[in-house]
Image (cartoon, rainbow, N blue to C red):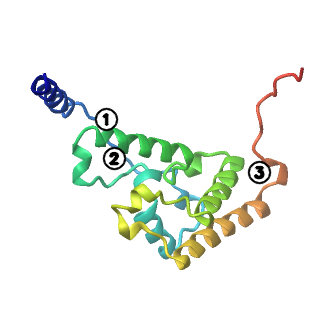
Amino acid sequence: MKKKLLLLLLVVFVAIQFIHPERNESAKPQTADISTIYKVPVDVSNILNKACSDCHSNNTIYPWYANVQPVAWWLNDHIQEGKGEINFNEFASYAPAKQYHKLEEFKKQIDEGEMPLSSYTLIHTNAKLTDSEKKTLTNWSEDIRNQMKAKYPADSLVMKRGPRPPEE
């Protein structure tokens, strides 16, 4: 019985190797990239590329193990979730209130040590942020938010909430 179960598991494992999610790789020009509307200094760009871009852009650099299932599905889930939170390649397409809010969340995640994910830095050790790199990123995001405060009316930087259900 154990041999049959192991054989079945092996067959399933081999079969799932042929089912891959779509890769997060775009050859298209990134016309809505954050750099099209805000200055991204070289030091910030370097930090974003090493610690953020794999999950928060339209171009992921995949490691070899991304070709093995179910790892590819797990990675794809993280990438899609990350892009849903903030996608630096789509940032210019966000409404100003969303941009402002996303930069606030970005700073908070870095300040609290929640980004990059520990599961990512476990393997990508170079993605661990030093205190200096954290300060560089948080200062940059605050600078952009300050530019936005100077450019837009205050009420346009507030995320609108949907209608609330009636209170009982």
Q: Earlier in the sequence, mark 1 or mark 3?
A: 1
Amino acid on which the number 2 mark rests in the picture: Glu
**Label 1 SS:** loop
Most extreme residue toward the right, as rendered?
A: 168
Q: Position of residue 11 (x, y in %)?
A: 13, 27
Q: Is residue 30 visible?
A: no
Q: Is residue 139 left or right of residue 123?
A: right
Most extreme residue toward the front, as rendered?
A: 1
Dividing the image into 4 quarters, which one contains the C terminus?
A: top right
Q: CA distance from mark 2 to mark 3?
A: 31 Å
Q: Position of residue 149 (x, y in %)?
A: 78, 61
Amino acid on which the number 1 mark rests in the picture: Pro
Q: Position of residue 137 (x, y in %)?
A: 57, 69
Q: Which mark is residue 105?
A: none
Q: Which mark is residue 21?
A: 1
Residue 111's place in the image compared with 153, above or below, is: below
| Residue bearing the label numbered 3 | 157
Q: Residue at point 65% right, 55% down?
A: 105
Q: Position of residue 129 (x, y in %)?
A: 48, 71
Q: Nearer the viewer, residue 102 or 165?
A: 165
Q: Residue at point 64% right, 52% down?
A: 102
Q: CA distance from mark 2 to mark 1?
A: 12 Å
| Residue bearing the label numbered 2 | 25
Q: Residues within 10 Å of mark 1 (few under 14, many from 20)?
A: few
Q: Residue at point 46% right, 59% down?
A: 52
Q: Nearer the viewer, mark 2 or mark 1?
A: 1
Q: Nearer the viewer, residue 55 or 145?
A: 55
Q: CA distance from mark 1 to mark 3?
A: 36 Å
